[in-house]
Image (cartoon, rainbow, N blue to C red):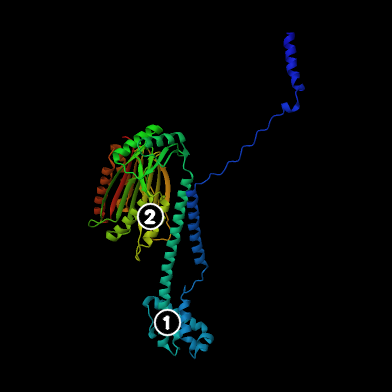
Amino acid sequence: ALPLLLSAGLGLAAPAFFPKHWLTPVPEAPAPPEEPPRLSAAATRLEAVAESLSSLAETVNAVYDAFPRRCDTFRWVIDNTHDSLCFNCGRRETCWKQEYTATLEGMNALRSILEQQGHLQTSDLPGQLSRCIHPAALCAAANRSFALYRSRKEAHVHAEAMRTALTEQYSAMADALSVLSEQLGRPGNPEPYKSGRVAAFFASLGTPPLECAVTLDDLGRARAAVTLPRTRFSSPELAALAQETGRICRRDFDPPQVLSCKGMTTLLFCEKPALRAVFGTAGTAAKGTVSGDAVQQFCSPAAAQMILCDGMGTGRPAAVDGSLAAELTARLLKAGFTAELAARLVNVALALKSDEESGATLDLISVDLYTGTARIFKAGAAPGFLVHGGRARPVGDISLPIGILGGVNGQSRVVHLAAGDYAVLVSDGLLVDGPGWVAKQLELSAAAGDPPEKVARILVETARARAEQTGRPDDITAAVLRLEPCGH
């Protein structure tokens, strides 16, 4: 026991003989401050252009608001009539000073006559102006002033529409470039080892890549971009390249998207999504064969897109507006624009299409095929339907169509779908008897596992029969999307 006690005592007393600085804890070095993410040169340039366009739109609006307003009220007609006729009249002192109140009441009384008839006759002069010694000249001067006032007012309205369209275009393009700049500034986490192996694979084929990058996005999905000298590939070759590139990266790639520009070809490989979309559509015109409804259905590398636009009215004019809105929206979505930005640009296009009023509803759903997240955007569109877990429910609230206002009054929401779910977009002609029967029919079709084409046809045929019974025919269209497991 004695050796143990001596050892314990020495152990406890030993620290007292150590230098003090030996026992002082070393403070941890402060972590270096995180450097802000550096944008690439292209992203920086795009951000600068976006800021310039946004500033330009703000400057145009500020200058417009600062300008004085002229010829805005009927008082301008009165003043112009006075300056062109009454200013040199011998009774000016009597009419415009001694009897100013009565004269002004008489001139204001001319407004309703001029707005209804467009011109003035001596018999139309009110009692307050019966003392005028030049009644014919007064009528002629008032007619000229009112015609000039109306033409200037129309020019002002046209200029206001043009200014709104111009600044809206600048703002929408600025927002789109900002989104693109943000995407370029976050290219993903690089995979140098896999990039080198993919580059070596293409070099072994006799086409050394000019640039090769394999990255992981925020959700862990792998993407590969290979830039080569201008080369053409057949569909079987692209499928074989996707298979081998996927083997190297240990991922399952779809055949790549091919982009060619300025003597170079870029192959963009993306992972196969977990879901795939099956589309179906059906429609009938209110009269004849021309329908004002237009549908666009397609898949981008990561999402399924479905668009339904209903032109205002029926016949060819409505068909022009509906087709224009659907086609422009599809092109903008394929170029990477969001639904809100695409709607703003299409709104400008419809507003400036012609002197006549143009308008169309915009109904859009975009489904992420990796996660099932669906983004719904509606502007003036009829309620759509989602079938999830065999239960159908309507989605969408009342809003205004695009093309009739300077801005877009749209509504967007996010929902989550899974394999076996349906998304249905319909024009208002299909809801002639309300949404109740549509929801019941969709639940029956979902229980039977009907394909989207059959679902759309049943809805349109049933709605057509109901519309004929009520005597309220309209263009009827249904667009259906069903999600299925990839490989099903």
Res 275 seen here: yes
As measured in the structure, the alpha-carbon distance from the residue carrying label 2 to the one carrying label 1 is 43 Å
User: What residue appears at the point 34 percent right and 34 percent down from the top-left corner?
Assistant: 243
Describe the element under mark 1 as helix, strand or loop: helix
Residue 208 higher or lower than 310, as above or below: above
Near-viewer residue (189 or 442): 189
User: What residue appears at the point 46 percent right and 42 percent down from the top-left corner?
Assistant: 187
Alpha-carbon neighbours of circle 2 within 10 Å: few (<14), some, or many (≥20)?
many
For this orientation, the residue located farthest to the front is 206
Describe the element under mark 2 as helix, strand or loop: loop
Residue that mark 2 sits on: 380
Left or right of 118, for residue 291: left
Q: Amino acid at mark 1?
A: Ala
Res 125 seen here: no
For this orientation, the residue located farthest to the left is 288
Return the mark for residue 77: none
Quick one: label 2 or label 1, which is nearer the N terminus? 1
Quadrant assignment, res 385: top left
Residue 414 lies, in percent from the top left, at 42, 45
Residue 440 lies, in percent from the top left, at 31, 43
Near-viewer residue (232 or 472): 232
Residue that mark 1 sits on: 142
Residue 268 higher or lower than 291, as above or below: above
Near-viewer residue (392 or 379): 379
Q: Amino acid at mark 2?
A: Gly
Quadrant assignment, res 453: top left
Alpha-carbon neighbours of circle 1 within 10 Å: few (<14), some, or many (≥20)?
many
Residue 392 higher or lower than 90, as above or below: above
Near-viewer residue (199 or 138): 199
